[in-house]
Each structure stands twice: as C-alpha cells, then as structure tokens.
Image (spheres, helix red, strand yellow):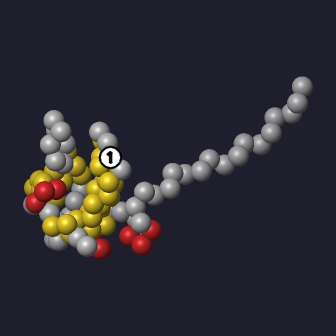
Amino acid sequence: MEPMKPMKPMKGSEPWWPQEFGQPSTSGGQDGMRYAFFPDKQRLLVETDGKLATYDSGDHRISGVSQSNGRAPSFTTQDGDVNVNDLKVAD
C-alpha cells in the first residue's frame, strides 16, 4: 500500500474583473449575469453572457442586485433600487 501524498493547495478563483479596479465592495451573480461594484472608482461592472459592460455609478452605493423574468437587473442603493439601464455607460 502506497502512503498518502500531501494535498495540493486549492487555487482560488481568479477575479473576472480587470486588476486595476482592485477589490469590489460587493459582487455576485445569477442567471448568466455577474456584477462587481467599486465605490472608490464609481464603477459598476456587469458581465452578461460573457459581455462586459462598465457603468458610472455616480453617487450610488450599490449593495445588492435583483433580477426577474429576463428583465435588466436592478441594483440596491442607499436611495432605493436603480435599474442598470438608468446608469451611464463609462468609457
């Protein structure tokens, strides 16, 4: 019988957002969509079916997301829900 070999360390999942954004204050995903919010940069990144879009979050402090029946996601902010289509696309 061969002795057990030591376990190899597990690799953490690599961030899907560009490294220059740093760590998001919140991130998540569901149903083929994922998001990450970077308050210091005032940016919300949303990836839907492999396509990445960057939004200017302005004064919004995003803390969560909701999505229903294939509609555009809405993000929970300090002032209530904001639909992603109401945010300005950033360069």
**What residue would you read off at disc 1?**
49
- Residue under the image location 22 percent in, 60 percent down: 62
Snapshot quadrant of residue 53: bottom left
Q: Quadrant of the C terminus?
A: bottom left
* Residue 90 x/y as whole percent: 23, 70
Q: Amino acid at mark 1?
A: Asp
How far across and down, in percent of the image, does residue 27 sit?
33, 54
Q: Nearer the viewer, residue 49 or 26?
A: 49
Q: Position of residue 47 (x, y in %)?
A: 31, 53
| Residue closer to the observer: 20 or 10 | 20
Relative to 77, 16 lies left or right? right
Quadrant housing residue 46: bottom left
- Residue 16 is left or right of residue 30, and the answer is right
Rendered location of residue 33, percent (x, y):
30, 46
User: Does residue 77 appear anywhere in the picture?
Assistant: yes
In this rendered view, identify the residue nearer to me: 47 or 76: 47
Residue drawn at the location 22% of the way across and 49% of the way down: 65
Whether residue 76 appears in this view of the structure is no
